[in-house]
Amino acid sequence: METYIIRIYRRDKHAPHNIIGIMEDVDVGGTRAFHNAEDITSILTGEGKDTKNKIGREKRRIDRLKLRLPVRMDGVDDNGKKFTEYAIITNISSYGAYINMKNQISKDTGVSLIIDPENSCLNMRAKAVRFEKNKNKTGVGVAFIN
């Protein structure tokens, strides 16, 4: 028997077949993104296998979902001051997320996240692992912590 973990990040109440999330194969360790119920069926039956690693694209441990989600972040900035910031996640996976934020934090800084605070209120702990400076915001890659 095969074992999977399915994480649903967004669903449309008016079109229940439109769901966005990640399916993890526990036995093999691979992860695939899905955007609707048909994608889940394709993953389970092995149809439409992802070939991106065979054509020379970047290899990743897991698929990322390009999904804009609101997030509330609580942490301590580079000046040692506590902050609460409402920001936007631009992509997410089962291992982490990429967030555009205004506050400056350092690598390995721990933050508390409430993803989609008005709807799902998913609480996560994360640490900053990557930074990209933009015009008036910083893109921060965070890794989720158990």
Image (tube, rainbow, N blue to C red):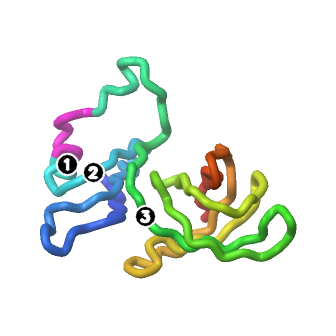
Q: Could you tell which of marks 3 and 2 lies nearer the N-terminus?
A: 2
Disc 1 to disc 3, C-alpha distance: 21 Å
Q: In this view, does 42 lie above or below 122?
A: above
Magenta residues, as a range?
42-49
State which mark lies toward you, 3 or 2: 3
| Residue where numbered disc 3 is placed | 69
| Crowd around label 3: few <14 · some 14–19 · many ≥20 (10 Å) | some
| Residue where numbered disc 2 is placed | 34
Expressed as whole percent of the image width and height from the top left, the position of residue 12 reads 21, 69
Q: Would residue 95 be counted in the magenta stretch?
A: no
Q: What residue type is labelled 3?
A: Leu
**27, 23: nearer the viewer:** 23
Q: Could you tell which of marks 2 and 1 lies nearer the N-terminus?
A: 2
Disc 2 to disc 1, C-alpha distance: 5 Å
Q: Quadrant of residue 119?
A: bottom left
Q: Which residue is drawn at 16% across and 57% down?
A: 37
**94, 90: nearer the viewer:** 90
Expressed as whole percent of the image width and height from the top left, the position of residue 129 reads 68, 49
Q: Which residue is drawn at 32% across and 55% down?
A: 3
Q: Which residue is drawn at 19% across and 48% down?
A: 39
* 23 sits left or right of 88 in the view: left
Expressed as whole percent of the image width and height from the top left, the position of residue 40 reads 21, 52
* 103 sits left or right of 121 in the view: right
| Crowd around label 2: few <14 · some 14–19 · many ≥20 (10 Å) | many
Q: Which residue is drawn at 56% across and 73% down?
A: 72
Q: Could you tell which of marks 1 and 3 lies nearer the N-terminus?
A: 1
Q: What residue type is labelled 1?
A: Asp
Task: State the mark number for residue 39.
Answer: 1
Mark 1, secondary structure of its residue: helix
Q: In which quarter of the image is residue 126?
A: bottom right
